[in-house]
Image: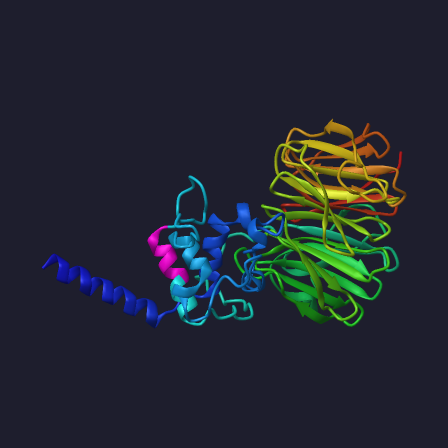
Amino acid sequence: MRAVLAIVFSLGSHTALQAAAPDYADVQKIFQAHCMDCHSSEDPEGKLVLENFDTLMKGGQSGAVLAAGKSGDSLLIKFLEGRSGKTGKNQFMPPGKRDHLPLAQITLVKAWIDAGAKRPAVATTAEIRFPDIKPRVAPPRAIHALAHDPDSKLLALGQHGALAWANAASAGERQPRVPAPFTGHRGNVNALLFARDGLYAAGGDNGFPGELRFWNVKEARPVRILRGHRDAIYAMAITTDGSLLATGSYDQKIILWNTKDGAPVRELSGHSGAIFGLSFRADGKVLASASADATIKLWSVATGARLDTFSQPLKAQHAVAFTPDGARLVAAGGDNRIRMWTVSATAVEGTNALLHSQFAHEGAILKLAFSPDGTHLASAAEDKTLKLWQASDLRLAKSFGRQPDWPTAIVFADAQLYVGRQDGSLQSYPWKP
């Protein structure tokens, strides 16, 4: 009787799998959890990269690793099941003494292959419905990003679902305003950049595809909306000539975009944590990234190759910035320190030295920003402090005192340093000594 029930249950499970074939996203979650140590784009075993659908279908040095519709003949499944040995000795993936994939996960991968190994659908943003619970008091509208336009003297503020604006012409407490046309963003606007012909705003909802909007500010309309990340965008940088834009996401990827037509140029992979900070060198040839994996990486903009990895940080890195002349790089994050490196012309490994490591705050450092003339560096931290440092040697130049809430965004606007806070307040301080 038990045998009969087992067969019925097995057939029922198989029918359920056939009725609802798994999506590539389900397969990718398995690869991310078990296979990235050996099969990321950085020195992949057997030249097989499992970071996305295209690299999987490209295969490795032995050729294609799967045959659509034929899981039993697919080299990938043979490795997962230990049937790949050419000399009579079984070879498994993952190799060595690592735990082999559970049968249920192998079955899921096989079901996806047998269903045709279909390309993932274009990411769409699902509609989230929340219960209509009215707060008793108006919740604070945290400021997640700030950007300054020297020509119009406007400050753009990134908040949840919208952009707000303020006039940077005067100092002190400011009351931002939210014009109706600048609404419609999904999730928090985490990064802002003024360009010659508009404003870039990036962010998103956690767990859903990130969104990048390019606004025509004068006409108050979005020119284009770009989607390419699988999760919210947290970092953005643009080259000095404005031709190339970089975005970094919680999905651990960096995407380079052509600003002329919004087309993606290439994807950079190598971090094992969210991307929280990006900065282009002044010449546009090198991109620096700060990640939750506690590293800073340098990338060749022309080829996408990783040039160097700075592993001195001990915790997640939240911010990174090149000096205006591009000769040095600063970064900071969860270990409360600001570090400075020299960056050579080639920026390749072995040519970039750590210059300073300055204990700066009693809490994790959230943001860094260089003054327009490059002489000073501002830092904001979770201990609710805002400080100014000499850019040459990271000596403390000024402390602006304890803030009423987390200073979540900072930007220099001529002679003023603006700080946006978690409670939605915006304030400026004279910064020049």
- What's the residue at 77%, 65% (across, down)? 259
Q: Nearer the viewer, residue 67 or 334?
A: 67
Q: Quadrant of residue 4?
A: bottom left
Q: Nearer the viewer, residue 364 or 343?
A: 343
Q: Can the viewer see residue 256 in this picture?
A: yes
Q: Which residues are magenta?
A: 102-109
Residue at the far front: name it: 87
In this picture, is 259 found above or below 304?
below
Report the front residue among 142 and 140.
142
Was residue 107 drawn as part of the magenta stretch in this picture?
yes
Residue occupying the point 86% across, 44% down: 345
Q: Position of residue 172 (x, y in %)?
A: 79, 44
- Is residue 268 positioned above or below 376 on the image? below
x, y (%) of residue 24? Answer: 48, 64
Locate residue 379: give its quadrant.
top right
- Residue found at x 88% / y 47%: 414
Q: How is the image coloured?
A: rainbow
Q: Quadrant of the N terminus?
A: bottom left
* Residue 288 as seen in the image, left or right of residue 253: right
Question: Percent from the top left, x then y, of residue 348?
Answer: 78, 42
Does 24 sit left or right of 391 as displayed?
Answer: left
Q: Residue 160: image x %, image y %?
A: 61, 57
Tell me if 281 is positioned left or right of 266 in this view.
right
Task: Count the numbered circles shown.
Answer: 0
Q: Is residue 9 above or below residue 334?
A: below
